[in-house]
Amino acid sequence: MNAVEIEIAISDLAMQSFDALEFPYEFLRAFGNKETTIKKLKSGSSNKSDVGGVLQRNNIHILVSEPGKVDESLKALHDSPATAKNKVKFILATDGDSFQAEAIDSGETVACDYAKFPDHFSFFLQLAGISTVKQIRDNAFDIRATSRLNRLYVELLKDNPEWGTADQRHEMNHFMARLIFCFFAEDTDIFLGTDLFTATIEQMSARDSSNTHEVISEMFRAMNTKLADRDGSGLRSWANNFPYVNGGLFSGSTDVPRFSKIARSYLLHIGNLDWTQINPDIFGSMIQAVADDEERGELGMHYTSVPNILKVLNPLFLDDLRKKLEEAGDNPRKLLNLRKRIARIRVFDPACGSGNFLVIAYKQMREIEHTINERRGEPGRKSDIPLTNFRGIELRDFSAEIARLALIIAEYQCDVLYRGQREALLEFLPLNAENWITCGNALRLDWLSICPPTGTGVKTIADDLFETPLDQAEIDFDNEGGETYICGNPPYIGTREQDKQHKLDMKAMFDGRINSWKAMDYVSGWLFKAAEYGRFGQVATAFVTTNSICQGQQVPLIWPELFRLGIKIDFAHLSFKWSNLAANNAGVTVIIIGLSNSNNQGCRIYSIGKQGELEVKYVDCINPYLIPGRYDSLTAVKASPFGLSNMVKGNYPVDGGNLILSRSEKDEICSRSQCADQLIRPFVGSNESISGTPRFCLWIDESNYELAKSIPDVRARIESVREMRLSSKKVATNKSAERPYRFDEIRQSGNENQIIVLPVHSSENREYLPVSIESGSTIIYGSAFALFDAPLWNMALIASRIHLVWIGTVCGKLETRYRYSNTMGWNTFPVPKLTEKNKEDLTRCAEDILLARERHFPATIADLYKPDAMPDDLRAAHERNDEVLERIYIGRRFRNDTERLEKLFEMYSKMTAGKKGA
DNA sequence: AATCCGACATAAC
DNA sequence: GTTATGTCGGATT
């Protein structure tokens, strides 16, 4: 269960009449406990309570008390030996009237009326195993509001199906945005009178809900009518209490969907929440799921955490503003200039979703401006930062509506915080009519027209600006457009995940410009749009993107062309897992890249340290692999120009598992027909080579096909392969159904003597790549690369530290795991010309590694290469191998990986330069 | 004909 | 239910 589902379950529980016997179990159910767990507790078999309550080990101890004795019950729970013994996290006592609970570790307590306990649901979230407790607890309101709005949304669509059609979706979304605004406004005195909106609905609409839509519509009409125009507008007197709001929010149709009784009660229920607690940054990203059919299942889970957003905004420009603030000290003139600079900064998120990057940026800038105003002795001064400087593009209609609303709310909240409620109210209404969030496809829109950099003759605003006479500086500022910062988290869609429309977007951008654009991630469109935009002003960009655009295949496609546009990588945040509110948080691995056309010196590489702290490395420049240095991006090649043996991918069965046998399957077949033995070979892919589990395969060709057909078990399997291949969508696979007894793609003769095997994917935690040797009779699976009958010194290279570093840098990755590639990693691997002596030495090294492994038989590669548990003799053999190999490169060991990469890229560049010359 | 990828997939602990 | 670590098929070149 996710946080939203829990909130719903708890709210439901609190609304039911209190059942003293069932309450503990219902409570546990609400937190997602399974029926079997509840059953065990009920039967007493797992209930450890010693005070007559319900105790779930490691979780909670609940006691339903006599009426009026909740204090005593909580104390009994607290003092209970069972509570301590069973490592209980929470104790809870209630009599159905009042409710008390305590978190044992923190000592935090909750005491409230029973009916109100859902307000504290986040207090207990640990019970559901939700790890990001802090984030949720801080945003409990947003989750509750989201879940309630979602229920209303679904209910309304049920009663008004036509509002869910493509034609009217926009109206529906707009309606929801209006509602949210009204809830916020009635709780923040923007509407005069307590709960004016909700109360008016409650009073003016019939209990049977029949005219709810008319009442709401009339209020909307009021909010779209200027006070001056109200005479003669025929507004009902109760609607006349509402102010003129508009700003686009209440213009257009004031149609309202019809409300069922349930929908009406949901609506009133939502109105009773305390909307002053809304976090526009968090709320927006949650609520966008309300209107999104696809996302509804994972409601509230697409939360972009504030720390992650700051990972983008801080290095992009906020750090610099704060530095300038610090440098300005109390100097009024410097502070004034900084304020003027801030007022001209535009923040542009071309994939803004519900606007959380914009909202956070706005709030941070307001905070800095506030400090300036305080230091200048102007506290409470009206802000110079126009909301119109925060622009966005968003594809989804509802998100675009919410983004705009979120910014409006953020502005109001900042005004309250820095200027006081009175001032904030005075200037809030009517809303500004300009729309700064464009709903559309960012890759098809002209960014310059959506966020025009005013004044193109922009000079760099240098530090010494602050030293020039005041009036001079002011003139300069007036003539300049100021800075634009592009930021956001645009969608990543891998080449195979893109649908037709995505491909068309990509084609429109890249066809005729980048040859293999089809292999690029969809997100690269944003990078190019930003790079082009950056030519028209003082612009810097930072996006969260999938890490794959800085790895392997995509690097030579994307980056040379970006560099040609004058782009440079100012900063980068290395791979980290994107996290959201989901309980099991698989997510995706991302990087952050900061780009600009400027010549700013000093680049920064951020990463997350071992303790989870932010680490920064200052370097001269950053290359597309996100390592320091000006290295080329390299392209795949078919064969090694350095004289390495040919490395090929293993064989692909494309058999639906029918040609593959476990040991027991093999034994079974062989026991039924002995001659099947001749058709079966050991089968080794990456998993088998690393973990040592044996597998086998049917290896049949024309010469023994007749034999194969005569064995019923084998015959049946061949028939299954035929069917499986015929049912494939791929034409080539259909064709290979003609020979179903063979692997689909065969890369080895089956008559080899010795095979060097190397898994395609392997853990990044090992110190060396898990290369191994298999006997010639083995069939290699496509999940591994193979060198057939190659000299053993090849293995010495693969097993070296320097090779691992190269692979980790230039190849693709699976999340953060190594993903080996023959064309990008092996064939490009620069090796000095090896003498016969070198090859002999390296062969010896490889043999020593194999011997060391042999001594630990039957330990597998997985056992032997555990990060902290490598046997000493094996480690020593690898050390010797590295020593011998690195001496061949530079006559000594390398000092570190940076030095290794420098040498390798230098050799690679020389090699490619030589080729071009020839 | 062969490669490289996955807002991943899933077995193992 | 975290944690660890690699499937599998096919679009693309």
Image (cartoon, coloured by chain):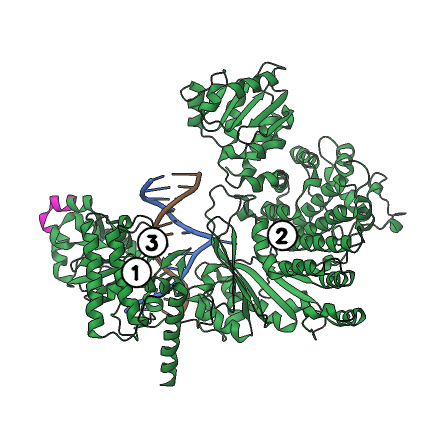
Chain colours: A green, B blue, C brown
Instruction: Identify the residue under disc 3.
Output: A766
Amino acid type, label 2: Asn
Amino acid type, label 1: Asn
Q: How far apart are marks 2 and 1 (CA)?
A: 49 Å
Q: Distance between the residues labelled 3 and 2?
A: 39 Å
Q: Mark 3 lies on which chain?
A: A
Kindly check if marks 3 and 1 are in contact, taking CB atoms under 8 A apart as contact: no
Is A360 located above or below residue A747 in the figure?
Answer: above
Q: How crowded is mark 3: few (under 14 residues within 10 Å), some or many (20 or more)?
A: some
Question: Residue A636 magenta-drawn?
Answer: no
Question: Residue A670 magenta-drawn?
Answer: yes
Asked if badges 2 and 1 are on one and the same chain, I answer: yes
The prevailing secondary structure element of the residues shown in magenta is: helix
Asked if badges 3 and 2 are on one and the same chain, I answer: yes
Is A351 located above or below residue A69 in the figure?
Answer: below
Instruction: Identify the residue under disc 2.
Output: A356
Q: Mark 1 lies on which chain?
A: A
Instruction: Identify the residue under disc 1.
Output: A734
**For this rendering, which residue is in front, A404 or A613?**
A613
> Viewer-nearest of labels 3 and 2?
3
Q: Where is residue A886 in the image (x, y as percent from the top left)?
A: 30, 67
A600 left or right, relative to A766: right
Magenta span of residues: A668-675
Q: Position of residue A594 (x, y in %)?
A: 56, 63
Sooner in the amino-acid sequence: mark 3 or mark 2: 2
Q: In terms of image quadrants, where is residue A65?
A: top right
Please tell me whether mark 2 sits on a helix, a strand or a loop: helix
Is A287 located above or below residue A42 in the figure?
Answer: below
Looking at the image, can residue A843 be seen?
yes
Amino acid type, label 3: Arg
Please tell me whether mark 3 sits on a helix, a strand or a loop: loop
Sooner in the amino-acid sequence: mark 2 or mark 1: 2
